[in-house]
């Protein structure tokens, strides 16, 4: 809508910010990215998100919306697509299932992957357990994708809510695989997820994601030293 002001309080390389940015691009929303220094939080961030004091925060005409999953759904509702290209399905059951798997991604996927980074500084048993946990989580996603219907995405032929929640993996997973020496069984156990990655990389909206080497640098310099202590 004309006259709208949309700002995204962000920080590189937050996967949670990436979700929101991809959602905004998918829905064709013009926005201003406002980078934040999380080591010296601005008054704007503290005022906009006084509860959690973290990014992302979406400011829509001055009103703040926080937490990535909530923001993504807000974007979908605030800017509905006339051609049916919404992130959430039209039917109530479809929306419930999309929200269920989006919640699974939020609670399981990134925790499992970060667990492999932490375990990379531990014993061989810890490394093995962390890798097995990632494979189990990814296998569950594979099964959900198989049951989700035709199309490369969880949303079918179009990118939907679950895809947007998962899409930061395009930037983060290569770095984690490299640094944690993680080897996922794509061909044998995860062929649908492998196809999902290919389709997501080819989607125009994912051009806003940082290149994996930037994530590798961040993990090497910031995250891994924390686990070493």
Image (tube, rainbow, N blue to C red):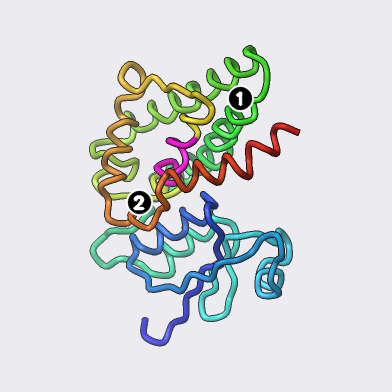
Specify the label residue 89 is tagged with: 2
Which residue is under mark 1?
A: 120
Determine which of the numbered discs, if any, sits on residue 128 in the image.
Answer: none
The quadrant in which residue 70 appears is: bottom right
The quarter holding residue 185 reads top left
Q: Is residue 85 visible?
A: yes
Residue 69 visible to the viewer:
no
Q: Main secondary structure of the magenta part?
A: helix
Closer to the camera: disc 2 or disc 1? Answer: 1
Q: Position of residue 3 (x, y in %)?
A: 41, 87
Q: Quick one: SS at disc 1?
A: loop
Residue 93 in the image: x percent, y percent?
Answer: 41, 44
In the image, residue 179 sits, relative to residue 128, either above or below, namely below
Between discs 2 and 1, the one toward the N terminus: 2
Question: In the figure, is residue 115 to the left or right of 183?
Answer: right
Range of magenta residues: 167-175
Spot occupied by residue 47 in the image (x, y as percentages of width and height): 70, 73
**At 67% across and 16% down in the image, what residue appears?**
123
């Amino acid at each position: 809508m004309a006259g709208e002001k949309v700002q995204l309080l962000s920080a590189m390389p937050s996967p949670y910010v990436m979700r929101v940015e991809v959602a905004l691009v998918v829905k064709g929303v013009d926005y201003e990215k406002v980078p934040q220094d999380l080591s010296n939080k601005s008054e704007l961030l503290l005022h906009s998100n006084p509860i959690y004091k973290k990014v992302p925060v979406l400011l829509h005409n001055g009103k703040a919306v926080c937490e990535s999953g909530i923001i993504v759904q807000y974007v979908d509702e605030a800017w509905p697509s006339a051609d049916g290209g919404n992130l959430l399905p039209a039917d109530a059951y479809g929306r419930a299932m999309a929200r269920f798997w989006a919640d699974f991604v939020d609670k399981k996927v990134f925790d499992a992957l970060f667990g492999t980074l932490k375990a990379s500084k531990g014993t061989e048993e810890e490394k093995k357990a962390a890798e097995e946990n990632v494979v189990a989580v990814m296998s569950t996603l594979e099964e959900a994708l198989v049951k989700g219907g035709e199309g490369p995405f969880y949303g079918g032929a179009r990118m939907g809510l679950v895809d947007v929640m998962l899409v930061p993996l395009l930037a983060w997973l290569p770095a984690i695989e490299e640094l944690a020496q993680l080897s996922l069984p794509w061909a044998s156990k995860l062929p649908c997820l492998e196809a999902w990655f290919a389709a997501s990389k080819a989607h125009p909206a994912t051009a806003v994601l940082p290149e994996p080497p930037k994530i590798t640098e961040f993990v090497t310099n910031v995250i891994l030293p924390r686990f070493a202590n």
